[in-house]
Amino acid sequence: MNNRQFSQALRKLATVPSQVAPEVSRNIRKQIFKDFSAGTDPYGKPHKPLAESTKARGRHEPALLDTKRGRNSIRVFPMQGGGVAITVGTDYMWRHQMGAGPPARYFIPIGTLPKTYWAIWQKALDRQIKRHFGK
């Protein structure tokens, strides 16, 4: 590979994150929905069980899925430059995320990226790099 070919390859490689962000966004949203159905946070840790008083009001396990309104308000979308953003369209879901009032039931990663999200990124990046460079 000569210098010109190497330079062209590097330019192609720099575009890969923005090219995979739409696919990654869709798959992270699917993962969030799977986590809700399993009653776990993004790291696989189970959510705290519902309080007896909450069950007495007709709510059911797993938490946060009786109406699905909060879960369905979650948007995951690609950001310019190759990142992914997650937004929530209901105020009460943020109270659950932050543990402000009800017990914390994380549905968005805090701190480190979960292994499942890493795997989603890696799979998409590998596929796109293979598409660009073969092998």
Image (cartoon, grey):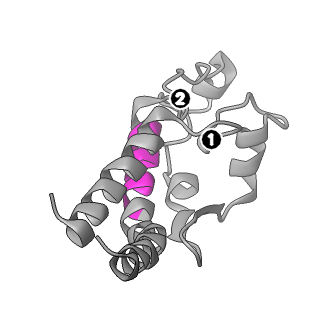
Q: Nearer the viewer, residue 49 or 105?
A: 105
Q: Which residues are magenta?
A: 26-36
Which amino acid, mark 1? Pro
In the image, residue 91 lies at what x, y percent?
75, 57
> Is residue 34 shown in magenta?
yes
Which amino acid, mark 2? Tyr
* Label 2: how many Cα within 10 Å (few below 14, some 14–19, many 20+): some
- Residue 43's disc number: 2
- Residue 109's disc number: 1
Determine the residue positioned at 58% across, 40% down.
113
Main SS class of the magenta portion in the image:
helix
Instruction: Name the quarter where the N terminus is drawn.
Output: bottom left
Determine the residue positioned at 46% across, 44% down.
117
In the image, residue 92 lies at what x, y percent?
73, 51
**Quarter of the image where one finds residue 26:** bottom left
C-alpha separation, residue under disc 2 versus residue under disc 1? 8 Å
Instruction: Name the quarter where the C terminus is drawn.
Output: bottom left
Label 1: element kind: loop
Q: Circles 2 and 1: CB distance less than 8 Å? A: yes
